[in-house]
Amino acid sequence: MMEPNELIESGLLELYVIGQASEEETILIEQMATDHVGIKKEIENISIAIETLAIKNAIEPDPTIKPFLMATLRYIARLEKGEPVTVAPVLSKQSKRDDFVQWLDREDFQLEGELNDFYAHIISGNPEATTAIAWIKKLSPPEEHDKEFERFLVLEGSCDVVIDGMLHHMQPGDFMEIPLFKSHHVLVTSETPCKVILQRIAA
């Protein structure tokens, strides 16, 4: 049987806390924790330290991932119900709101409920390009693309697009293409959400 200090210094308590101790080690540790207050206290301290470290280093999930996944599922459901496949125009500096009016005016393509962070309706999607109507409440987090160009046309509201530290002020009617391998994020500057046509095109 180990001495309490020997067990504390062995590293087995850390393995126990993270669930990596063997069955034999677990039995030993739990028996010693019952018999020695110091062992029990050390297990509590290790648990607190690991939890604190995990919280400190936690990565906030991208708030656009779930809404875009839900938009994709809604798009698939629409196609399964017989909606014809359409191909949205390719966004460019010449693009304007009227190019997308057939989708913008659809009742089922409006913002549903209260906007949390991000919401989207997919207009069209294929391996070459995905096009959506999207609403951004406050910001979209930093990201970088290596396999697709991201383009968008501002429809309502305003935002700042920061590309590798360079600030671009965007108003309704403005177009932007994000270059490959460039870190970028969006900050909404209007009181209302920034509504855009968002397009991702395979590089």
Image: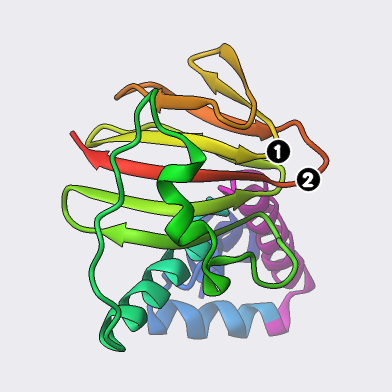
Q: Is residue 159 above or below residue 62?
A: above
The colour style of the image is rainbow
Q: What amino acid type is highlighted by mark number 2?
A: Thr
The label shown at residue 157 is: 1
User: In what quadrant of the picture does the C terminus appear?
Assistant: top left
The label shown at residue 70 is: none
Q: Secondary structure at mark 1?
A: loop
The magenta segment: 34-61
The label shown at residue 192 is: 2
Q: Is residue 114 above or below residue 146?
A: below
Q: Residues within 10 Å of mark 1 (few under 14, many from 20)?
A: many
Residue 30 occupies quadrant: bottom right
Q: Residues within 10 Å of mark 2 (few under 14, many from 20)?
A: some
Q: Nearer the viewer, residue 27 or 125?
A: 125
Q: Residue 135: image x %, image y %?
A: 61, 51
Q: Nearer the viewer, residue 20 or 61?
A: 61
Magenta stretch: helix, strand or loop mostly: helix
Q: Residue 140: image x %, image y %?
A: 58, 41
Q: Are marks 1 and 2 in contact (CB under 8 Å)?
A: yes
Question: Does the magenta-highlighted stretch encompass residue 169?
Answer: no
Position of residue 197 in the picture relative to residue 113 (left or right): left
